[in-house]
């Protein structure tokens, strides 16, 4: 039994859950946990002379695979899960919990109370 619990704890401990961020600094902090990828960029500049020349500049920009904006868009019960270099957006369903007062236990008798005190 202890071995199963230890294995489950190890599996769960490798997962990191990131929830909704309302603060830009928090979102930037979350962004640092994810892999950096190179994204191709393209810039086009036009001249307004009679020649109508256009220059296209291509380059690469490093950015996080999961951007900070994603953490602002998360809904209630939604998380970005990171494990073993992979990330996935997950939504936990809300369970309908039946709300009721706790059941009353048997009240002790006067003799039982007197015996305790």
Image (cartoon, grey):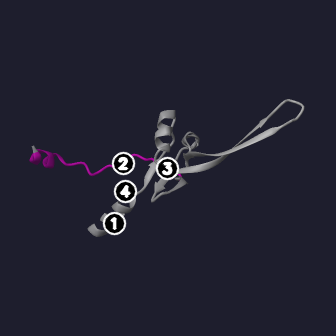
Q: Nearer the viewer, mark 1 or mark 3?
A: 3
Mark 4 to mark 3: distance in Å? Answer: 17 Å
Label 3 Cα neighbours within 10 Å, binned few <14 / some 14-19 / many ≥20: some
Q: Nearer the viewer, mark 3 or mark 2?
A: 3
Who comes first in sequence, dot 2 or dot 1? 1
Who comes first in sequence, dot 4 or dot 2? 4
Q: Secondary structure at mark 4?
A: helix
Residue position for label 1: 7
Mark 4 to mark 1: distance in Å? Answer: 10 Å
Question: Magenta segment: does it hold 111?
Answer: yes
- Assign the C terminus to one quadrant of the image: top left
Residue position for label 4: 13
x 11%, y 45%: residue: 114
Q: Which residues are magenta?
A: 93-116
x 39%, y 46%: residue: 101
Q: Main secondary structure of the magenta part?
A: loop
Residue 102: image tag = 2
Residue position for label 3: 34
Q: Is residue 1 something one can see in this rendering?
A: no
Q: Secondary structure at mark 3?
A: loop
Q: Secondary structure at mark 1?
A: helix
- Residue 43: x, y in percent? 71, 40
Question: Pointers 4 and 1 in contact (CB under 8 A)?
Answer: no
């Amino acid at each position: 039994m202890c071995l199963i619990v230890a294995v489950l704890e190890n599996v769960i401990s490798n997962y990191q859950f990131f929830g909704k961020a309302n603060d830009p600094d928090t979102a930037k902090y979350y962004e640092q946990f994810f892999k950096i990828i190179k994204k191709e960029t393209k810039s086009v500049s036009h001249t307004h002379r009679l020649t109508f020349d256009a220059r296209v500049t291509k380059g690469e920009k490093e950015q996080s695979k999961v951007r900070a904006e994603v953490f602002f868009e998360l809904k209630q019960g939604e998380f970005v899960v990171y494990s073993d270099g992979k990330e996935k957006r997950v939504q936990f369903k809300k369970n309908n919990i039946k709300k009721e007062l706790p059941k009353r236990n048997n009240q002790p008798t006067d003799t039982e109370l007197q015996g305790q005190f």
